[in-house]
Image (cartoon, rainbow, N blue to C red):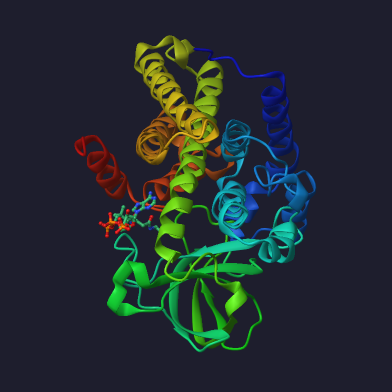
Amino acid sequence: MDFKLTEEHLMIRDAARDFAKTELLPGVIERDEKQEFPKELIKKMGDLGFLGMMASPEYGGGGMDTISYVLAMEELSKIDASASVMVSVNNSLVCWGLDTFGNEEQKKKYLSKLTTGEKLGAFCLSEPEAGSDATSQRTTAIDKGDHYILNGTKNWITNGSSGDYFLVIAQTDKEKKHKGINAFIVEKGWDGFEIGPKEQKLGIRGSDTHSLNFNDVKVPKENRIGEDGFGFKFAMKTLSGGRIGIAAQALGIAAGAYELAKDYSKQRKAFGTEICNHQAIAFKLADMHTQITAARHLVMKAAWDKDQGENYDLSGAMAKLHASKTAMDVTIEAVQVHGGNGYVKEYHVERLMRDAKITQIYEGTSEIQKIVISRSILKD
Ligand code: COS
């Protein structure tokens, strides 16, 4: 067993840390307030390779392992979880899904633009009545020979308006239930594809979340991913990896808040000494550090499982469950350590606390992770 990171891993982590401090930190409060994320910043992330880290180099990807990816996700998330959710969706849901299950033409046409940041991707599974209950898809894709006709609504879609290519899950044959579901690549601007208004959110406010409407959208058959009926498996397999990315995001939010709280506790004085010298604060830091370290081990193990070709459904679900709880617990305590200043935007911890909550909800709620975990441990 070796807990050491390689030189290459450390370089990637440091590059992400540096980018987060120099490019993401300035303006992070303003982006949160205004609910916006400049296109130039997305382009910079693409130019530096953060948008296609694990994808095959022949399609413009970085060809890196999952360990590298989670290290970068942690660093970006310490500063700006809105940026890191874009990175996560594009890398682990869209690029990975296409790289692993797309055909040669789809990879050439779509993946090669998504890995470089020339185009941004979105993953569209959730619906008004199909969030956790993902097999209950109401969006339909009716087979018309050489094309499908897509109708329906998708909800809470990250990169909803900034995205260019959308992986859309839809029901083709209701009789076959989840075996009649397909996944399609849909381009922004196609007739009948409408982007709804931006959601006003509690956290990750820099990232744009929208509902999407599909009204008789014509999707060429060559844009279906995999065999007929593969869509639900596609979504599940892709989300399993996505959960490792979100676990890393949660870890980063927690670690970012912890670092701020630790630094603050060494400067702020009360009762004649720095507050870190009071056990009330020191013990909070001890708990935070312990929880974060446990979360990091779970995240790394899930990433390692994926890199080794092992099944990572269980380890990914455990990593997400624990890291997202850690993000909530630690950010709440980080605000507490900051006292009155914790409630003020300039100190960053209130934003991290708001950002943390979504990690217990998207890409499978904590309750869904417990379904995945319990089914896995009980099956043998
Ligand atoms: N990898 C591959 N296949 C999987 C899978 C996985 N990780 N998880 C489930 N499947 C397959 C099952 O094997 C089954 O296929 P077969 O009938 O061929 O065996 C099929 O998918 C249906 O699985 P299951 O019967 O377990 O479906 P359930 O309706 O019980 O739901 C959960 C399973 C709850 C795990 C699933 O619906 C889920 O993950 N929901 C949350 C979705 C989500 O994350 N939403 C957030 C949207 S993205 S922001």
Provide residue 183's location: percent of width, then percent of height.
Answer: 49, 68
Q: Using the image, determine if residue 272 lies above or below residue 198.
A: above
Question: Could you say where residue 336 lies in the image, as x and y percent from the top left?
Answer: 39, 31
Number of disc labels? 0
Q: Is residue 154 visible?
A: yes
Q: Nearer the viewer, residue 44 or 109?
A: 109
Q: Position of residue 59 (x, y in %)?
A: 74, 53
Q: Quadrant of residue 231?
A: bottom left
Q: Residue at x 57, y 35 (%)?
A: 70
Name the residue nearer the viewer: 28 or 158: 158
Quick one: quadrant of the C terminus?
A: top left
Q: Quadrant of ligand 1?
A: bottom left
Q: Residue at x 52, y 64 (%)?
A: 226
31 relative to 24, above or below: below
- Residue 158 visible in the displayed image: no
Quarter of the rendering containing residue 190: bottom right
Q: Position of residue 53 (x, y in %)?
A: 68, 43
Q: Residue visible at 73% across and 25% down?
A: 11
Residue drawn at the location 50% of the way across and 28% of the way down: 300
Q: Nearer the viewer, residue 154 or 331?
A: 154
